[in-house]
Image (spheres, rainbow, N blue to C red):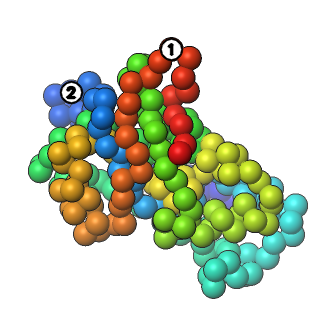
Amino acid sequence: FDLAGFSLGVVDENLMIGQDGPKNDDILIGIESSGFHSNGFSLLRKIIADYQLDLKSKVQGEELGNILLRPTNIYVSEILALKKILEINSISHITGGGFLENIPRMLNKNQKAIISHNFSDWPAGKYFEWLMEITNMPKDNLISTFNCGVGLVIAVSESDEEDALGILNQSYYAKTIGRVEERKMNEDEISFV
């Protein structure tokens, strides 16, 4: 059987993060995921069945079953602490739909995100590299389905980048992954460099 849960919160409108969205030239900071974060499991179950993978088999020295059961990082404490020190202009939890569906939601219609992503930059990136290797799945497919090691993305002004990274790295690995720029009418909402 499957066990699922969710939470729902209420926030005063004047306390919402990113009401006006990010500003052009804002810095995008990625915060590490713990792994698959409960997303893409229909595809993962199919891969496990199709490739006859044993949940006790080792992936980067860890049992596959344990990797899949690893709890999702919850970033509430870190974001609330950060919010007391600087302004978070926008935020996106990288869930099902990966980067391609979630990051555009944090932007205004006339903006695009320029992103740099390498699996090796992220502690959980090794799991997604493994998945790509055993399935020959193109990276584009992974990026549009999974978090690929990045569980949360925030937009902050360039002047707050160093402080944000210093605070976030006390709890989770975080690094700058890109920036927000003005988007021309024909341009994609997200580009990888």
Residue in the foreground of this view, choosing between 116 and 146? 116
Q: Of the residues shown, which amino acid type is indicated by label 1? A: Met
In the image, 82: left or right of 151? left
Residue 45: x and y in percent read 76, 58
Q: Residue 80's x, y, as percent?
A: 21, 51
Residue 106's place in the image compared with 45, above or below, is above
Q: Position of residue 10 (x, y in %)?
A: 27, 36
Check disc 2 and give the amino acid type.
Glu
Which residue position is annotated with label 1? 185
- Residue at 21% x, 56% y: name it: 162
- Label 1 Cα neighbours within 10 Å, binned few <14 / some 14-19 / many ≥20: few
Q: Rounded to the nearest whole Å, what is the CA distance between mark 2 and mark 1?
A: 30 Å
Residue with the most extreme top position: 185
Work out whether mark 2 precedes mark 1 in sequence or the reverse, and give the earlier one.
2
State the image quarter where residue 49 is shown. Answer: bottom right
Q: Which mark is residue 141?
A: none
State the image coordinates of residue 55 (x, y, percent, origin top left): 73, 75
Q: Is residue 74 above or below residue 21?
A: below
Front position in the image: 59 or 26 = 26
Please give the residue where the numbered disc 2 appears in the rendered image: 13
